[in-house]
Amino acid sequence: MKITDKDLTRQDEDIAPGDFADEERRDDRFGNWPEVAGLVFTLIVIWLTFAFTG
């Protein structure tokens, strides 16, 4: 599947209901791990910022 600029800028309202459901199923494949990993990474960066800048 090739992603184009048009695909990146489409809003949920612009997507047909069937395509939207397919996209949601693809997103559910990963669960919440991307959000959890992003939160952990952010907390580490904040901690490092305060740890080394005093």
Image (cartoon, rainbow, N blue to C red):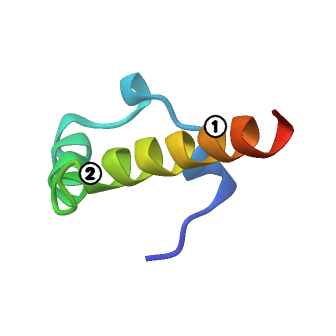
Point out the tag, 2 or 1, that comes first from the N-terminus: 2
Quadrant in which the C terminus appears: top right
Query: Looking at the image, which is closer to me, 47 or 30?
Result: 47
Which of the two discs, 2 and 1, sits closer to the camera?
A: 1
Identify the element where label 1 is drawn. helix
Q: Tell whether 15 sits left or right of 2.
A: left
**Given contact means CB atoms under 8 Å apart, are the residues at marks 2 and 1 in contact?**
no
Q: Amino acid at mark 2?
A: Glu
Looking at the picture, how far across and down is residue 27, in whole percent? 25, 53
- Name the residue: 85% across, 38% down: 53
Using the rendered view, name the quadrant where residue 3 is placed: bottom right
Which residue position holds label 2?
A: 23
Query: Looking at the image, which is closer to me, 41 or 54?
Result: 54
Q: Which mark is residue 46?
A: 1
User: With respect to residue 34, does 17 lie above or below?
Assistant: above
Crowding near the residue tagged with mark 1, few <14, some 14–19, many ≥20 C-alpha atoms within 10 Å: few
Using the rendered view, name the quadrant where residue 33 is placed: bottom left
Q: Which mark is residue 7?
A: none
- Name the residue: 35% across, 44% down: 35
Using the rendered view, name the quadrant where residue 16 is placed: top left
Q: Tell whether 1 sits left or right of 52.
A: left
Looking at the picture, how far across and down is residue 40, in whole percent? 42, 48
Q: Amino acid at mark 1?
A: Ile
Query: Looking at the image, which is closer to me, 18 or 43?
Result: 43
Identify the element where label 2 is drawn. helix
Query: Looking at the image, which is closer to me, 44 or 50?
Result: 50
Q: Tell whether 12 sits left or right of 52.
A: left
